[in-house]
Structures are given as C-alpha cells and as structure tokens.
Amino acid sequence: MAMLLDIIIDGLIKGSVYALLAIGFSLVLGVARIINIAHTALFMTAAYLIYIGSKLMGLPLLLAMTAAVVLTVLLGLVVYRLFIQPIQEHEAAVLIATIAVAMMLQEVFLMSFGGHYLGVPPLVEGFLHILGVKVTMQHLLALGLSLVMLFGVRQFLMKTRLGLALRSTAQDREVANLMGMDVNRVALLTVAISVGLAAMTGAIVVPLITVEPTMWMHPLIMMLAIVVLGGLGSIEGSFVGAYILGFAESLVVFMLPMGSFLKDSVALSVMILVLLIRPEGLFGVSFEEER
C-alpha cells in the first residue's frame, strides 16, 4: 500500500509537470510550426535564475520565482525574434537553431556554476501522513499548483478569444490568415505563453530537484516521447500522453532494480513503437501542409 501510494503521488506530480512542458511545446509546434528543442533548456534557465535570486542575491523565494519567470519569457522572446523568426519558414534550420540555443544555455551555466548540484529551499516545510505514508508539503504544493495551471491553460484555450485564435491558427494557418488574423502576432504570443509555461513549471519543481547544467535533457526526452505518443500538435494528446508516461516512469523507478537508469529507455521505446505502429499518435492532428 505504501509503495502504491508513492507511485500514485509521484506519477501525478511527474505527469502534471510533463503535461505542462508538453502542452507548451505542442502549442508552439501547432501555431508557429517550430520544433523547439530549447523548450526544456528554458525550463532549466528559470531554475538557475531562481537559484541565483534566492541563494546568491538573497531575494525572497516567491520574488525570485516571479522575476525568473519574467526574465525567462523575455529571453525566449529575444531568442525567437533574433534567431528563429528570420528562418521560421525553414524547418530544418529552425530545428538546428533551437538545438544550438539549448547547448549554448547549457554551456553558459556550466561555465558559470560548474557541474555542481545546486538546490533551492522549499516554499513550505513539513509533511503529512497519508495512509501511513509520509508526503512532504512541498510535493503536495507542487501537485496542486500543477493541476491548477493545467486547468487554467484549458480554460484559457477554450474560453478566451486569444485561446480561440491560437486553436484556429494551429488548425489551419492559411485560413486563419485569410480570416484577418495576424498570424505572426499570434505566433509571438504563443511563444511567450509556451516559454511562460516552461518557466512556471521550473518554478514549481525547482525545490524538489537538483539544479545542474544537464537537467534539461531528461525532460526533453520525456516531452518528445509524450508529444509523439499523444500526436504532434495535439493539446489533448499531450495531456493524456504526459500522465501515461509519468505513471510509467514512476512504475519503472519504484518497481524495477536500477529503475532510475531505465526511465529514459522506456520513454524512447514508447516513442519508437508509436512511430512504427501509429505514427499520428493517440490524438493525431493533420496539419494543412498534409491536406
């Protein structure tokens, strides 16, 4: 029972975090047609900025988190305008550019902080006993905030005019342009929202993880596997796929010997199988280029 509860809580937290990352990735892929490999590197950037603000500058943790999210979004917009937008029509060049940005961010933090494992104190102290299992308040807070953010993203996409514009542009960019939408402005806003989701996800989980220069690679593997499993550009697919792989990772880590070393292999195996058996994923979306 204790292990089952550990798996459920860990799977819910991981699934929610991966869902936030994958939804942000899917948004910018669907609307702007950008395969942003640097998405999780921006997640890492927010984590490092929170460490800098809270540990090195002595700012209150909430203030450091807020500043980190804002600065990360600004950095993402600068990268988009300078490096991505001029070559946006060339998908291979965009892919290479985002890989270069991710590696550049990794090297900047590696040179600045070395390969040291850094940490950020929790927002809340203490723990609860749930069915005999000790669960920290920080884990429960991270789970609650992740679920609230997921609900907020869904309401934004389904209930607001900007959300409708994003979904319309993702469904058919040319028709949205003909209907009078400024698709370039919509793409810019989508990048800001996507980077904001990555940064806020970093703020949610940074008290639970160690901050180091390669921390973006595992979330990248999971995010790509989730997007392939759910269907490229599908928000619903990203949500469902995130929880499937989040619970799968928790099962592997808790139940298999050396499971923590196998979790990436499981995600990659799922991705390869989906590409071989059902390339469109669970909720595949047909882009207008394929019609």
Image: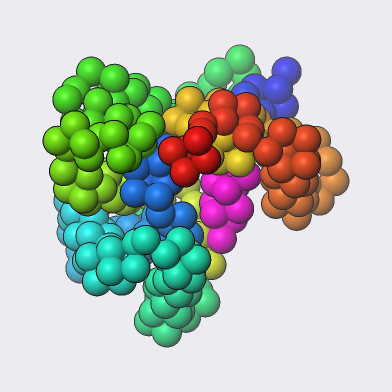
Between 254 and 22, which is closer to the camera in this rendering?
22
Report the residue at 50% width, 66% height from top: 92
Q: As drawn, is 218 to the left or to the right of 177?
A: right
Q: Could you say where residue 137 lies in the image, as x and y percent from the top left?
A: 42, 31
Vertical placement of residue 40 versus 235, above or below: below
Q: Which residues are magenta?
A: 217-225
Q: Quadrant of residue 111?
A: bottom left
Vertical placement of residue 233 versus 272, above or below: above
Between 87 and 163, which is closer to the camera in this rendering?
87
Vertical placement of residue 239 versus 46, above or below: above
Q: Is residue 223 magenta?
A: yes
Vertical placement of residue 216 versus 21, above or below: below
Q: As drawn, is 131 to the left or to the right of 212?
A: right
Report the residue at 17% width, 25% height from top: 161
Q: Could you say where residue 11 lies in the image, as x and y percent from the top left?
A: 60, 31
Examine the rendering and report whether any part of residue 170 can be seen: yes
Q: Could you say where residue 82 lies in the image, as x and y percent from the top left?
A: 24, 71
Report the residue at 72% width, 33% height from top: 278
Examine the rendering and report whether any part of residue 16 can be seen: no
The color scheme shown is rainbow
Q: Quadrant of residue 112?
A: bottom left
Q: As drawn, is 14 to the left or to the right of 65?
A: right
Between 83 and 211, which is closer to the camera in this rendering?
83
Q: Could you say where residue 164 lies in the image, as x and y percent from the top left?
A: 25, 26
Residue most toward the top? 131
* Image label count: 0
Residue most toward the bottom? 111
Secondary structure mostly seen in the magenta stretch: helix
Viewport quadrant of the N terminus: top right
Report the residue at 17% width, 37% height from top: 181
Between 14 and 93, which is closer to the camera in this rendering?
93
Q: Is residue 95 magenta?
A: no
